[in-house]
Amino acid sequence: QLQLQESGPGLVKPSETLSLTCTVSGGSISSSSYYWGWIRQPPGKGLEWIGGIYYSGSTYYNPSLKSRVTISVDTSKNQFSLKLSSVTAADTAVYFCARHAVAGTRWFDPWGQGTLVTVSS
Amino acid sequence: QSALTQPPSASGSPGQSVTISCTGTSSDVGGYNYVSWYQQHPGKAPKLMIYEVSKRPSGVPDRFSGSKSGNTASLTVSGLQAEDEADYYCSSYAGSNNNYVFGTGTKVTVL
Protein backbone atom coordinates (compact mmCIF):
# COMPACT_ATOMS: atom_id res chain seq x y z
CA GLN A 1 0.00 0.00 0.00
CA LEU A 2 1.53 3.27 -1.11
CA GLN A 3 2.12 5.77 1.66
CA LEU A 4 3.53 9.30 1.69
CA GLN A 5 4.95 11.13 4.69
CA GLU A 6 5.92 14.79 4.92
CA SER A 7 8.77 15.97 7.13
CA GLY A 8 10.52 19.22 7.90
CA PRO A 9 10.61 22.20 10.28
CA GLY A 10 7.30 23.32 11.71
CA LEU A 11 8.44 26.91 12.19
CA VAL A 12 10.11 29.16 9.64
CA LYS A 13 11.06 32.81 10.01
CA PRO A 14 9.73 35.44 7.61
CA SER A 15 11.91 35.99 4.52
CA GLU A 16 13.57 32.60 4.97
CA THR A 17 13.13 29.43 2.91
CA LEU A 18 10.64 26.71 3.80
CA SER A 19 11.98 23.21 3.12
CA LEU A 20 9.95 20.00 3.25
CA THR A 21 10.54 16.43 2.17
CA CYS A 22 8.05 13.76 1.22
CA THR A 23 9.10 10.13 1.65
CA VAL A 24 7.29 7.55 -0.46
CA SER A 25 6.96 3.99 0.84
CA GLY A 26 5.22 0.91 -0.50
CA GLY A 27 6.03 1.81 -4.09
CA SER A 28 8.62 3.40 -6.34
CA ILE A 29 8.79 7.10 -7.01
CA SER A 30 10.19 6.16 -10.43
CA SER A 31 6.84 4.90 -11.69
CA SER A 32 6.29 6.09 -15.24
CA SER A 33 2.60 6.94 -14.81
CA TYR A 34 2.80 9.42 -12.00
CA TYR A 35 4.03 12.79 -10.98
CA TRP A 36 4.51 13.71 -7.32
CA GLY A 37 2.89 16.86 -6.08
CA TRP A 38 2.60 19.38 -3.28
CA ILE A 39 -0.63 21.00 -2.13
CA ARG A 40 -1.14 23.35 0.81
CA GLN A 41 -4.04 24.44 3.00
CA PRO A 42 -3.92 27.59 5.16
CA PRO A 43 -5.63 27.12 8.51
CA GLY A 44 -9.40 27.09 8.06
CA LYS A 45 -9.12 27.64 4.32
CA GLY A 46 -9.17 25.69 1.08
CA LEU A 47 -6.60 23.72 -0.86
CA GLU A 48 -4.02 25.30 -3.15
CA TRP A 49 -1.99 23.33 -5.65
CA ILE A 50 1.72 24.21 -5.50
CA GLY A 51 3.35 22.04 -8.14
CA GLY A 52 4.86 18.66 -8.89
CA ILE A 53 7.73 16.66 -10.30
CA TYR A 54 8.33 13.58 -12.44
CA TYR A 55 11.02 11.10 -11.43
CA SER A 56 13.14 12.34 -14.34
CA GLY A 57 13.17 15.80 -12.77
CA SER A 58 10.60 17.47 -15.00
CA THR A 59 8.64 19.99 -12.94
CA TYR A 60 5.50 22.08 -13.14
CA TYR A 61 4.48 24.90 -10.82
CA ASN A 62 1.47 27.03 -9.93
CA PRO A 63 2.08 30.26 -11.85
CA SER A 64 1.26 32.32 -8.77
CA LEU A 65 4.05 30.66 -6.77
CA LYS A 66 6.47 29.79 -9.55
CA SER A 67 9.01 32.50 -8.76
CA ARG A 68 9.47 31.18 -5.21
CA VAL A 69 9.06 27.41 -5.60
CA THR A 70 11.57 24.68 -6.32
CA ILE A 71 10.64 21.00 -6.31
CA SER A 72 13.30 18.33 -6.59
CA VAL A 73 13.46 14.54 -6.53
CA ASP A 74 15.89 11.99 -5.08
CA THR A 75 15.05 8.61 -6.60
CA SER A 76 17.73 6.84 -4.58
CA LYS A 77 15.90 7.77 -1.39
CA ASN A 78 12.39 7.57 -2.88
CA GLN A 79 11.83 11.16 -1.83
CA PHE A 80 10.87 14.48 -3.33
CA SER A 81 11.24 17.89 -1.79
CA LEU A 82 9.74 21.36 -1.73
CA LYS A 83 11.51 24.65 -1.22
CA LEU A 84 9.55 27.89 -0.94
CA SER A 85 11.63 31.02 -0.63
CA SER A 86 10.97 34.45 0.88
CA VAL A 87 8.11 33.20 3.02
CA THR A 88 5.60 35.44 4.76
CA ALA A 89 2.78 34.79 7.20
CA ALA A 90 0.57 34.08 4.20
CA ASP A 91 2.57 30.91 3.60
CA THR A 92 1.49 29.47 6.95
CA ALA A 93 -0.37 26.30 6.05
CA VAL A 94 -0.61 22.55 6.27
CA TYR A 95 1.51 21.21 3.44
CA PHE A 96 0.48 17.92 1.83
CA CYS A 97 2.36 15.75 -0.62
CA ALA A 98 0.45 13.45 -2.96
CA ARG A 99 0.87 11.10 -5.87
CA HIS A 100 -0.40 12.72 -9.03
CA ALA A 101 -1.74 10.64 -11.90
CA VAL A 102 -1.14 12.21 -15.30
CA ALA A 103 -1.16 9.35 -17.82
CA GLY A 104 -4.49 9.85 -19.55
CA THR A 105 -6.11 10.94 -16.32
CA ARG A 106 -5.70 13.54 -13.62
CA TRP A 107 -6.10 13.02 -9.89
CA PHE A 108 -4.22 13.23 -6.59
CA ASP A 109 -4.12 10.04 -4.50
CA PRO A 110 -2.99 9.04 -1.96
CA TRP A 111 -2.05 12.05 0.15
CA GLY A 112 0.36 12.30 3.04
CA GLN A 113 -1.07 13.22 6.43
CA GLY A 114 0.18 16.79 6.06
CA THR A 115 2.53 18.90 8.11
CA LEU A 116 1.81 22.32 9.57
CA VAL A 117 4.37 24.99 8.80
CA THR A 118 4.05 28.27 10.65
CA VAL A 119 5.84 31.39 9.42
CA SER A 120 6.65 33.58 12.40
CA SER A 121 9.58 35.37 13.96
CA GLN B 1 -6.04 31.26 -12.12
CA SER B 2 -8.95 31.61 -9.69
CA ALA B 3 -10.30 28.98 -7.35
CA LEU B 4 -13.34 27.08 -8.52
CA THR B 5 -16.55 28.26 -6.83
CA GLN B 6 -18.38 25.96 -4.43
CA PRO B 7 -21.19 26.74 -1.97
CA PRO B 8 -19.79 27.14 1.56
CA SER B 9 -22.20 24.65 3.04
CA ALA B 10 -24.78 21.97 2.29
CA SER B 11 -26.81 19.74 4.52
CA GLY B 12 -29.25 16.88 4.59
CA SER B 13 -30.82 14.37 6.92
CA PRO B 14 -29.64 10.77 7.05
CA GLY B 15 -30.85 8.90 4.01
CA GLN B 16 -31.41 12.04 1.97
CA SER B 17 -29.28 13.32 -0.92
CA VAL B 18 -27.12 16.39 -1.17
CA THR B 19 -25.59 17.90 -4.31
CA ILE B 20 -22.57 20.18 -4.35
CA SER B 21 -21.75 22.37 -7.32
CA CYS B 22 -18.31 23.39 -8.58
CA THR B 23 -18.23 26.25 -11.06
CA GLY B 24 -15.23 27.16 -13.14
CA THR B 25 -14.58 28.39 -16.64
CA SER B 26 -14.04 27.04 -20.12
CA SER B 27 -10.32 27.00 -19.30
CA ASP B 28 -10.71 24.43 -16.56
CA VAL B 29 -13.95 22.60 -15.68
CA GLY B 30 -15.59 23.27 -19.03
CA GLY B 31 -12.52 22.51 -21.07
CA TYR B 32 -11.53 19.10 -19.76
CA ASN B 33 -13.12 15.97 -18.31
CA TYR B 34 -10.56 15.99 -15.54
CA VAL B 35 -12.66 17.04 -12.57
CA SER B 36 -11.99 15.21 -9.32
CA TRP B 37 -13.59 15.42 -5.88
CA TYR B 38 -11.98 15.01 -2.46
CA GLN B 39 -13.45 14.36 0.97
CA GLN B 40 -11.64 15.78 3.98
CA HIS B 41 -12.52 15.06 7.58
CA PRO B 42 -11.24 17.49 10.24
CA GLY B 43 -7.51 17.17 10.78
CA LYS B 44 -7.17 14.53 8.08
CA ALA B 45 -5.76 14.38 4.59
CA PRO B 46 -8.10 14.69 1.61
CA LYS B 47 -9.35 11.43 0.08
CA LEU B 48 -10.10 10.95 -3.61
CA MET B 49 -13.81 10.24 -4.11
CA ILE B 50 -14.43 10.93 -7.81
CA TYR B 51 -12.10 11.37 -10.78
CA GLU B 52 -12.60 12.15 -14.46
CA VAL B 53 -15.95 13.80 -13.61
CA SER B 54 -17.84 10.63 -12.71
CA LYS B 55 -15.54 7.70 -12.03
CA ARG B 56 -15.24 6.19 -8.56
CA PRO B 57 -11.97 4.74 -7.23
CA SER B 58 -12.12 1.26 -5.80
CA GLY B 59 -13.57 1.29 -2.32
CA VAL B 60 -15.64 4.46 -2.68
CA PRO B 61 -19.35 3.72 -2.10
CA ASP B 62 -21.65 4.08 -5.09
CA ARG B 63 -23.61 6.60 -3.03
CA PHE B 64 -21.11 9.11 -4.39
CA SER B 65 -21.61 10.21 -7.97
CA GLY B 66 -20.33 13.00 -10.18
CA SER B 67 -21.46 14.83 -13.28
CA LYS B 68 -20.69 17.89 -15.36
CA SER B 69 -22.58 20.35 -17.51
CA GLY B 70 -20.72 23.13 -19.22
CA ASN B 71 -18.48 24.93 -16.75
CA THR B 72 -20.13 23.40 -13.67
CA ALA B 73 -19.40 20.02 -12.13
CA SER B 74 -21.47 18.43 -9.39
CA LEU B 75 -21.02 15.84 -6.67
CA THR B 76 -24.07 14.05 -5.33
CA VAL B 77 -24.08 12.06 -2.12
CA SER B 78 -27.13 9.83 -1.92
CA GLY B 79 -28.37 8.04 1.16
CA LEU B 80 -26.46 10.38 3.47
CA GLN B 81 -24.72 8.76 6.39
CA ALA B 82 -23.17 10.31 9.47
CA GLU B 83 -19.66 9.55 8.22
CA ASP B 84 -20.29 11.63 5.09
CA GLU B 85 -20.11 14.77 7.22
CA ALA B 86 -16.91 16.40 6.00
CA ASP B 87 -15.48 19.10 3.76
CA TYR B 88 -15.55 18.40 0.03
CA TYR B 89 -13.29 19.96 -2.58
CA CYS B 90 -13.42 19.78 -6.33
CA SER B 91 -10.36 20.07 -8.52
CA SER B 92 -9.84 20.53 -12.23
CA TYR B 93 -7.03 20.31 -14.70
CA ALA B 94 -6.53 23.78 -16.15
CA GLY B 95 -4.28 23.01 -19.09
CA SER B 96 -1.31 25.14 -20.12
CA ASN B 97 1.78 23.74 -18.49
CA ASN B 98 0.03 21.27 -16.25
CA ASN B 99 -1.99 23.72 -14.17
CA TYR B 100 -4.52 22.61 -11.61
CA VAL B 101 -7.08 24.47 -9.57
CA PHE B 102 -9.08 23.50 -6.49
CA GLY B 103 -12.52 24.58 -5.39
CA THR B 104 -13.28 26.78 -2.40
CA GLY B 105 -14.68 23.83 -0.46
CA THR B 106 -18.11 22.85 0.85
CA LYS B 107 -18.89 21.73 4.36
CA VAL B 108 -21.50 18.98 4.33
CA THR B 109 -23.51 18.58 7.50
CA VAL B 110 -25.64 15.55 8.23
CA LEU B 111 -28.54 16.83 10.30
Image (cartoon, coloured by chain):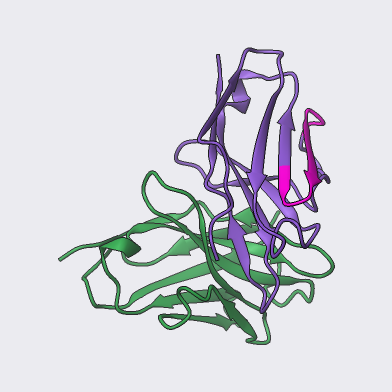
Residue A76: x percent and y percent?
61, 83
**In the image, B9: left or right of B78?**
left
Q: Is residue B63 magenta?
A: yes
Q: How many numbered discs sit on the rendered protein?
A: 0
**What quarter of the picture does the N terminus of chain A occupy?**
bottom right
Residue A26: x percent and y percent?
68, 61
| Residue at the limit of the structure toward the left, as seen here | A121
Asked whether B26 or B61 is in front, the reply is B26
Query: Which chain has been coloured purple in this picture?
Result: B
Query: Which chain has been coloured green in this picture?
Result: A
**In the image, B107: left or right of A94?**
right
The quarter of the displayed image where residue A111 is located: bottom right
The quarter of the displayed image where residue B93 is located: bottom right
| Magenta part, dominant SS | strand
- Image height check: is B42 above or below A81? above
Q: Residue at x 50, y 53 (%)?
A: A47
**In the image, B41: left or right of A30?**
left
Q: Does any portion of residue A12 appear in the rendered image?
A: yes
Q: Is residue B45 magenta?
A: no
Q: Does any portion of residue A109 appear in the rendered image?
A: no
Q: Which stretch is magenta? A: B61-73
Residue B55: x percent and y percent?
83, 46
